[in-house]
Image (cartoon, rainbow, N blue to C red):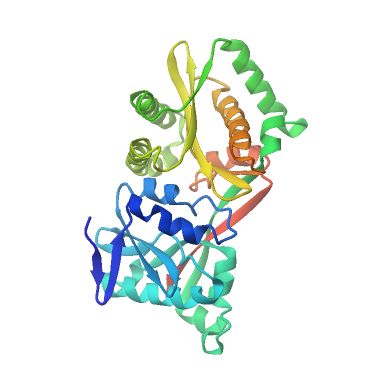
Amino acid sequence: MANLTVKDQTLKPFTLDAKPIIEKYLQKLEIDLSDYTFAANYIWLANSSGFYAIINKCFCLFAITGGELTMLLPPLGKKKYITDAMIRCFEIMNDNNSSPYYARIDYVQESMVEEFVLSTDEAQSMFVMLEHYIVEKKLVDYIYLVDSLIDLRGNSYHTKRTEINKFQKSYPEYKIELLDSTKHKEEILSLFNKWVSDRVRYMPGEEAEHFLEGIYQERTAIKQMLKNYEELSLIGLVIYIDGELKGFTVGEKINDNTASVIIEKTDFEVLGCAQFIFREFSKMLKEHYEITYINVGDDMGFENLRKVKMSYRPFKLVPKYTIYQK
């Protein structure tokens, strides 16, 4: 992939070669959002092109879709450099895009929003910033105590324990394996296709159209994940019942204390499988990474997914913001 030049600014392609570069910046930040890893961005960029540049000593990640530039993350760097980097990034997007309407910065952490609108530069006061930009709260990440997901203690987890017990009684011959991106590839893709079919069948009509819009992107992301599984330093599990793959899950470490679940799919018709593999993967993440928290990402705006994630009693909800121009 070639560089993208916007006026006098050169943006480099966001390939696997960018992994050590962005991770150098990520390691200096205290962020537990699931979006702030190389792998999370790389696999979801399968349907568009990613580019990056070091601007004002910050790592700046862009995506181009239909010829229009947006930012997948805010500039990553020291606080004193972020505000000027954001302003410069909007200039770059405006220079490229057909309309200022398309320019935006997604997945902005709360502390970065505060830094942006409460700039220490008197000329860039909160009132001046908010005159030109809109800061909109979007989704939240659901973060849990890993021990809570493993132990499932108390009345609030009674249903989860019951579902897991029923699963183990109904399928005593289940088998769990470490995910192998070569061995399990075709079975994972086959399960995903079945999962899509089942979800649409049981999904409320008003949600189905929105759901199907993202399916192609998710399928492509899974293929990207499997293709570069080892290079992305991912970890995963699969579960077999009677010789058939009925579930898979993949995650990674975000920081010293937190791991994430990037994607998880189970056969919708195997009751208790989702609860069981989630608990077993929580055990694995704790053992492998020695973490305290697990981030399962956001709910993508789906009410059913929100209810499921809330049912696990999150330790905290971490908001994510998008910054637009007025």
Nearest to the observer: residue 207 or residue 35 = 35
State the image quarter where residue 206 is shown.
top left
Q: Is residue 270 left or right of residue 1?
A: right
Residue 234, position as x, y percentages in the image = 46, 39
**Residue in the picture at 50% in, 68% down:** 77
Residue at image point 48% right, 65% down: 76
Above or below for 36 versus 197: below
Query: Whole-percent x and y of residue 257?
Result: 63, 48
Q: Is residue 300 above or below residue 323?
A: above
Q: Quadrant of the C terminus?
A: bottom left
Residue lying at the far left of the rendered structure: 2
Q: Give the percent coordinates (x, y) of residue 104.
A: 40, 66
Residue 98 visible in the snapshot: no
Instruction: Decide: is 238 above or below 231.
Output: above
Residue at x-position 61% and y-position 47%: 258
Whether 139 is drawn above or below 135: the answer is above
The percent position of residue 18, horizontal first and vertical second, equals 37, 55
Looking at the image, which is closer to me, 28 or 75?
28
